[in-house]
Structures are given as C-alpha cells and as structure tokens.
Amino acid sequence: MSKIYILLFAFSMAGTALLCAQQTDSLLTIDRIYNSSEFRVDRQRPVFWVEDGDAFVTIEPSGEGEDQLIRYVSRNNRKSVYLSADKITPKGRDKALRIEDFTLSPDETKVLIFTNSGRVWRSNTRGDYWVYDFDSGKLQQIGKEFPASSLMFAKFSDDNAFVAYVHDFNIYKEDFTTGKVTQLTEDGNGDIINGTFDWVYEEEFGMRDGFSWSPDAGKIAFWQLDASEIGTFYMINNTDSVYSKPVPLQYPKAGYDPSSAKVGVVDVNSGKITWIPVPGDAVQHYLPAMQWVNDDLLLVQQLNRKQNELNIYTYRPSSGRLKKIYAETEDTWVDLRYPDLSSGQWGNNDFLLTDNNSALLRMTETDGWRHIYRIDINSGAQTLLTPGNFDVAAYYAITGKDIYFSASPDDPTQRYLYSVPLNGRGKMKRLTPESFSGVNTYNISPNGKYAIHNHTDTETPLTTRLIGLPGHKTTSTLVANNKLKNKLKTLEFPSVEFFKVNTPEGVEVDGRITKPSDFDPSKKYPVIFHVYGEPWKQMATDTWIGLYDIFLAQKGFVIVNMDNRGTPSLKGSAWRKSIYGKVGVLNTNDQALAAKEVLKWDFIDKERVSVWGWSGGGSMTLNLMFRYPGIYKTGVAVAAVANQLFYDNVYQERYMGLPQENREDFIEGSPVTHAKNLEGNLLIIHGTGDDNVHYQNMEYLVNELIRHNKQFRMMSYPNRSHGIYEGANTQRHLYTLITDYLLENNGME
C-alpha cells in the first residue's frame, strides 16, 4: 500500500469518525439525560423582597462555595453582599450554615435561616433555625435545647422581639434577648396536632404552616387537628434490616372521616387559648385558611365535607364575635386557590386584601367563568373586577389602583400577565409583551414596580428575568440557561405543533404533537399518547417539552398530549367541572374519542399505539388500556390509582362526592373494575414507599389481572415514594425500563 493511499485512507477514517461523533452528540441517551449534568437546568433560588420591593435578597455561593445572601437593587440589578458566609459560620465550626430558606424580621434587622432539614410527608419542613442580628452581629441558634432538625415554621413576631415555632406538635415562643422558651400549647402528641397539619391537609390543601402571629404580636392564631380517629395505613420497609419494619401513616381514605379541625387564638403572655366557635361538626368540615386582617380581626374559611359550600367568617378575639360575611355554593365543588400553571401559590389559601384591609379578593366560577371579585369584609358586598367570557388563571398582587393577574383569553395553552383597575370600572390590559409567547409566571414586588418573570415555551427551557412594571422592561436576566440552550442546539430537535380535534360527541380537545426532526408525512410513525386527564394538570401547554420527549422523538416516535374535559384548562367552568362524579369515565372517553381522530391522520401507524402516564395519568393509562383495548396496544402506568376507594378523601370526594351516596360511581371509574378487558401489552410500575398513591393499588390490580389470566409486566421500586426518585441510579433505571418496554412492543429495538 502506498504512503499516499495510506494517508488518504487515514483522512477518510478520521472524517468518518468525526461524522459519527457529531451524529452521536446530536442524539440523546438515557445516560445523557439521567446520569450526567450535561443538560442541567438552572433555576432561580428563593427571593425575598426587601425595602418594599426596591431590592431583593437571594441565596448564592461564595467564592469558596458556601452559602451567603446577596442583595440586588431592583432598578439596576446592582449586586452587594447582604450577609456573608463568615457571618453565618457558628463558633467552633469551619463551614457556614447551608441556607435552605430564610426570612427577614419585619424591620429587616434580623435574618432567620432554615438549615439541616428533614422530611415530613413530601417536603422538608423540619430542621434547625438560626438568627443573625445585623445590629449586634450575633449569630444564635433558636430552640437549641431541642433535638437537631426538629423545629418547624419558625417566624418572627411583628414587634421583632420573639420567634415562634412548632416542636413535636406544640407551639413555642422564644425571646431573643433572654433566650427564654415558653410552651404555648401542651396537648400535641401526634394525634392532637397543633400549629401544623396531617398528611391530607398538606397534600390536598397545600397546608403545612399552621400558625400566625397577630400584627400586635400579642396573640397567635393556630390550627388544631385531632387525627386520633384517622385510620393507619402501613407501608413496609423490607430492605433496611433483617426483619421488615412497618411504616405507619395516618391517611383518611375516601369515605372515611377526616381529622376534626378547629382554630384557636392563644394569648402569648397569659397562655390562655380561646377556640373560634365555627359552627357545624368539626369532623365534617375543613378549615383550609385563616389569616389576620388587623390586631383584632381574623378571616376564617370553612368548607363542608363535600367541598361544595364555602363560608367565610370574621372573628374578633376581643369580643368573641363570629360573623359570616360570604357564602358560596356549587353543584360540583368550590375551589380555593386554583390548580393552574401560573398560580405559584401552592400552600397559601389566604386572600389578597385591599382598600386598607377593608376588602378581600375572591375568585369564583358562579357565572360560568373564573372571575375575580372584590368583597367588602364588613358588608359582604361584591364587585366584579374581570367581566367577560374568559377565565382568570390566578391573581398575583395588588399595586396602587390595579390588580395583576394571569390569563390567556385567546389560547388556553398559554399564560400572560394582565392588569385591571380595582374599582371594577376599567378595562383589562395585557402587560406581557408579544415576544414572550408561551407560559409566563411572575413573583411581583410588594410595591408593584418590579417582578421576577419566568418564561418558557415548547422550544425554550425556563428563563428568569428581573423586570420593571407596568412597562415590562427587562432589567437583567437572572437565569438564562444559556449552557443548556446551546447544548440543545446541537441536538436533532423535534418539531412541535398545536392542534384541535373534535370528537363525535362535539367536544373540542386541545392537543400538542411532537414529531421527529426528519419527519416525513408519507411514512407511518408509532405514536405515544402521554396522558394525565384529571383536575390537577394540563398537558397540552406551550411549555418546554423536556429532554425525554426529545429523546423519544429521536427514537422515531410521535408524542401526543391532549387535554380532555375536567382538566384545568381556561375553557370555562362547565369544561372543568363536567367531570364531577365521572372521574375515570368522562375523561377517559374524551381521550379515547380524541385519539381515534388523531389515528385518522395518514402518518400515524394504528398498529403501534402506546399510552403512558404517572399518578392520575397512570390511572388514565389503565382505564384506556382496559376500556378501549381496540385503540391502545401498549401501556405504561406509573404510580396509578387502581381503585378510587383507596385514595385520600379530600381529593377523591371533591371530584366524586361521598362513597356513602354514590359508591357505584367510584367503582365504575376505577381501572381495576375493567382489568378483565386487557388485550395489549401492559407495564405497571410503583414505589413500595408511596405515601400518596399506596402500593396497595398495585397489588390489588395485580390480583385482578391474575384472576382473569391477563399477562402483564410489573416493577416495584423498594421504599421509593410517589416520585420514584430516591436512591442512586433510580431515575436512570426507571426511564430505561419504560423506554425499553416502548421500543420492544413497537418493534423498534
């Protein structure tokens, strides 16, 4: 072989290797997604507005990688150190405290730092608290006499003299100056819960922090729950010792009574507790919100057991007078804070107050659309602020004479910022510029002049900006995710389109379709329907599609997301609430009929139709596989509710009624009822430590499938919770399992 030929051959091989490397780099793998930081998504750390919004403070690493607090001027994003790492390094330690969260005292002279946290239910809400005093330069631990990681929800009094917190289901206050600790409740023991909540209040009402200082710092209002009659569900830990260990969980199943709930007011000086005389059976109602209006006025919200009646009361501690100022009823259910892409208010059912705290804002759907009303606290008089045939997604803040809220009157897949006058006589105005097409969410400063603006669309990961309002001018980009965006440009990126289909029943369903980058309409493609379909999630949204959908499209799949009736789309109250009493029936029917319309498209291979979903989407997957076996050939159901009677009472009864009255509807809507109809390929996946949708659902379904001699595959993840993420390599393993199953059963191995 001549030297010239050898040289040409070497160049050719090098070029081929380079081309192969480039092609490989353009394709995702499970390992690249779940076993590397190559496509890491950056997010803005928690922001605390200071100086009425003219500045904000956030957590950032120091040069040595330790946490510190940084102050930014809202007008120009000028940066300065607010609290350095060395100031929050306890004596005798060589590292600063890790700041997991923080708050400032009302006068902004002290910082309360939350660290060393531990998990309670699904969130890390217990931990250690330290206070740094700017005036004295002193760092001190709060509640240091108690075991590590055992305090919850510590907060400053408005006079800046005390911190109150929960420990072992009781409320304490602590004096900064003397260090004296005073126990304010005595009966908390796990069955009696003071100042925090049981599992179901946290999961379904977003309620964790269960007490609040009065503005004059003389009283604390707090919840007390009596969970002594709640049934205990036992999860089993088989892996951490030779003998298995039961993991007890107080969990009220559908049809079983919830914890009794009441609100008390404790005088922090005398320790005297007064219980607010909310009428009715304390076991047959929920108290999902309580807030101070002024030193001597509280607002209390009460829902009946069916959650179709909301009463709002005022209560005056000085006189003991309770007054109902508002009542709202629905044939279906009454929402509090609404499940929506743009709410950002999970865990806060309080009202926005206006007119010097003489009025509150409430969203209702009594006229067929979700609108904001101003309600006079004294008289109960109501003023409609957002008239028109459109839905408000969420409201954010009151500023001057306007309220800022989220809506998208023309396209339910998107969200934008609007303002409207508080007097009810002005027109709504869109503030989000046209250039930010997609979904936009906001954290607005107290003075309404600035906001943290989050934007995403199908092709763009989350970008966070600091903006001025009402002009929406960008001051700076806080989180650009440029590294991720540049990496995405190197990939074979799919095309994403939105569509609408009409079912034979006249239901218009919104959808989103993701197609391979080399899509050829003359070819036939396998389709994956990614589903949810219940009242807590919308799927066909103008948000970033994510790496896994990009990966599936690169494998040659078409991915379809559709929103049936009952999902929280901005299409009117009738759309959202038509699912009442029909979960598992109406939503499944809409999905199946819409899928039939999609399957009419020439490029869809009707013999390679898959469906998958998680949680409510897992239930939807099972129902579709069992009820419509002629459509769906392969299904993957993760963490699914197989029997609606096994799920919690607050969620299931809200959308289905009480099993004591219509048990047959719960049975009809449950996937397990129809398991005998399975014809296709089914993979069911569940974590044995799922405290939300219990592993019981998996085993109950497995028994039914075996009884009817239906073949299937199953995968249990030991001690993993509802998100199936705990433990090394878990997500990588999970998504490898799902992917291999989809490829195998669509002839794409």
Image: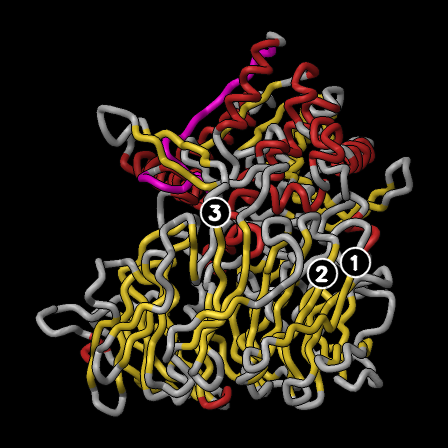
Residue that mark 3 sits on? 227
Q: Residue at x 69, y 20 (%)?
A: 674
Q: Picture quarter containing residue 336? A: bottom right
Give the distance between the C-alpha atoms of the residues marked 3 and 1, in whole angstroms: 27 Å
Mark 1 belongs to which amino acid?
Thr
Element type at mark 2: strand
Closer-to-camera residue (98/508): 98
Closer-to-camera residue (526/86): 86
Closer-to-camera residue (524/638): 638
Residue that mark 2 sits on? 310
Give the distance between the C-alpha atoms of the residues marked 2 and 3, in whole angstroms: 23 Å
Residues shaded magenta: 710-728
- Say how many tags the image has: 3
Q: Residue at x 90, y 35 (%)?
A: 504
**Magenta residues, dominant SS class:** loop
Residue that mark 1 sits on? 329
In the picture, the disc for residue 355 is: none
Q: Residue at x 76, y 65 (%)?
A: 327
272 part of magenta stretch: no
Asked if marks 2 and 3 touch (Cβ < 8 Å), the reply is: no
713 part of magenta stretch: yes
Residue 542 makes an appearance in the image: no
| 10 Å crowding of disc 2: few (<14), some (14-19), many (20+) | many
Q: Picture quarter containing residue 248? A: top left
Sequence-wise, the earlier of marks 1 and 2 is 2
Asked if marks 1 and 2 touch (Cβ < 8 Å), the reply is: yes
Asked if marks 3 and 1 touch (Cβ < 8 Å), the reply is: no
Sequence-wise, the earlier of marks 2 and 3 is 3
Instruction: Give the mark toward the camera: 2 or 3.
Output: 3
Mark 3 belongs to which amino acid?
Ala
Element type at mark 1: strand
Give the distance between the C-alpha atoms of the residues marked 1 and 2, in whole angstroms: 6 Å
